[in-house]
Image (spheres, rainbow, N blue to C red):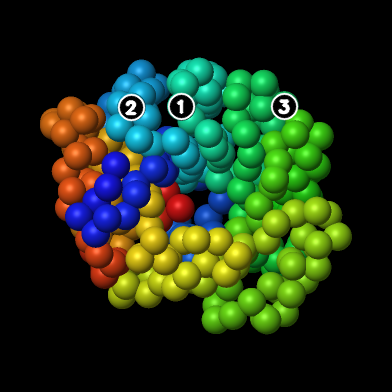
Amino acid sequence: MLDSYNRKINYLRISVTDRCNLRCVYCMPENGVPLLKHDDILSFHEIVTVTKIAVQKGIDKIRITGGEPLVRKGIVDLIRMIGKIEGISDFSMTTNAILLDQFAEDLKKAGLHRVNISLDTIDPEKFSQITRGGDIQKVFAGIEAAKNAGLEPIKINCVIKKDHHEPDALTVAKFCDENNLHVRFIQEMNLEKGDFSVVHGGTGGDCGNCNRIRLTANGMIKPCLFSDIQYNVRELGAEKAIDLAVGNKPQSGHVNLTGKFYNIGG
């Protein structure tokens, strides 16, 4: 698929839940957030239907996100269903890895290719502060489980304030270098202010070469994270929603006043 700026759209990010088992300070309020009603969240059948249509239209890269996707009940079954769709060349998941040691082997067997893991510091106390109570040892266990399962290459997503020379970023980079992990530095973003930049070590934030659309947990196809444009797959049908999203994909991101990271997906 080509959008109106002649960019090839071949990447679909799928948020499977707005729920998360951490409360990262830059993602959600300390007391949590209003959660979607169960009936508002797409079923596995609906997600697979949208994915099949997207692949038929030229999508060949799929990323599963959340919230935290591993808290979605039956997530391995969904991975298995999507993994059977012919035409997907890159099938990955973004996770905080808190539960990954329990799921890594089953995810690989179900057809997942690789994982991106969020890790902003390797200091246990700072990690607990950033995530409001998270146990970094569980993340380390998840990384090892992903390695053992063959969910590679493993990419580490490290959120930074300004640049990748910050102390925590440097120690994360050293950790990745020592453990054969690929690090990507993501500057802290603000949807309402339109603050974003190109990911260091990745392709996110490069509007001129953007190749992605998003499916939210409640069934909205969004052509851009930093935009309020969205199309409901339940109301319009997947094909029309995808066509409209691609056809109206903005040239560059601006602001998003209607969504949050926890309900759109990273």
Mark 1 and mark 3: span between their CA atoms? 23 Å
Where residue 179 appears, as percent x and y from the top left, is 83, 54
Q: Are marks 1 and 2 in contact (CB under 8 Å)?
A: yes
Query: Mark 3 to mark 2: distance in Å?
Result: 29 Å
Q: Amino acid at mark 3?
A: Glu
Looking at the image, which residue is at 38% across and 58% down? Answer: 210
Q: Please state which of residues 81 and 31 is positioned toward the viewer in this rendering.
A: 81
The residue sitting at 71% across, 41% down in the picture is 152
- Mark linked to residue 105: 3
Instruction: Return the disc, 1 or 3, that comes first in the chain's sequence.
Output: 1
Quadrant of the image occupied by residue 244 = top left
Structural distance between the alpha carbons of marks 1 and 2: 8 Å
User: As drawn, which residue projects farthest toward the left?
Assistant: 236
78 or 63: nearer the eye? 63
Quarter assignment of residue 110: top right
Residue on which the image places disc 2? 56
**Looking at this view, is 26 or 75 the one in front?**
75
Q: Nearer the viewer, mark 1 or mark 3?
A: 1
Residue at x-position 24% and y-position 51%: 3
Left or right placement of residue 244 versus residue 46 in this view: left
- First-in-chain label (3 vs 2): 2
Q: Is residue 112 visible?
A: yes
Residue under label 1, please give it. 87
Dot 2: element = helix
Q: Secondary structure at mark 1?
A: loop
Q: Is residue 189 visible?
A: no
